[in-house]
Amino acid sequence: MSPNRIVVGVDGSAHSMAALRWALQHAESLGWQVRAVYSWQLPMISIPGAFDQAQMQQLAGTELVRNVAQVSPNPAVPLEMSTAQGDPTECLLAACADASMLVVGTRGRSAFRGLLLGAVSQGCAAAAPCPVVIINQHEGL
């Protein structure tokens, strides 16, 4: 375990942006560091060779940098950014294997907006090896 590290899932949704903001503020109050993780997947239905994995990885990295800059252009804590290809829940669980805390938004970019919790936040809460904080964008953040 790497003490004093918060892993936060970022996907550009309002809930994940609130989660990122909360993670940065909480880390600053504790003197911790933050690792922002953006996962991506190739489309399930695609023509073989239609998507370049290196290009998709680069686009994911660009999106993560843009999301972080939107929330905090100059973070007051050490901030590591990483992208991972795969299922968001699995990517976040792998990323928080040595973390002190995992922070996710209540829902991401899923089409099921009426749900209280999204599949990723539920999966992380059920299986993470560390405490999980689930942030709702309406909590004044």
Image: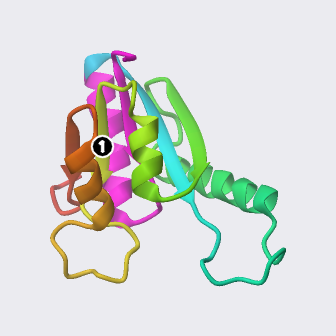
Residue bounds of the magenta highlight: 1-29
Q: Is residue 132 left or right of residue 58?
A: left
Q: Alpha-carbon neighbours of circle 1 within 10 Å: few (<14), some, or many (≥20)?
A: many
Under circle 1, the secondary element is: strand
Q: Is residue 2 magenta?
A: yes
Q: Is residue 88 magenta?
A: no
Q: Which residue appears at 25% of the width and 31% of the height?
A: 130
Query: Is 136 situated above or below 49?
Result: above
Q: Quadrant of residue 25?
A: top left
Q: Which residue appears at 36% of the width and 26% of the height?
A: 99
Q: Quadrant of residue 82?
A: top right
Residue type, label 1? Val
Numbered-mark total? 1
Q: Is residue 52 left or right of residue 41?
A: right
Nearest to the observer: residue 124 or residue 26: 124
Q: Which residue appears at 22% of the width and 41% of the height?
A: 132
Nearest to the observer: residue 67 or residue 122: 122
Visible residue check, residue 22: no
Q: Is residue 66 left or right of residue 98?
A: right
Q: Is residue 126 left or right of residue 81?
A: left
Query: Is 65 situated above or below 116?
Result: above
Q: What x and y, as percent, mark residue 41?
A: 59, 65
Q: How is the image coloured?
A: rainbow
Q: What x and y, as percent, mark residue 116?
A: 15, 70
Q: Quadrant of the N terminus?
A: top left
Mark 1 — residue?
Answer: 103
Q: Which residue appears at 24% of the width and 52% of the height?
A: 141
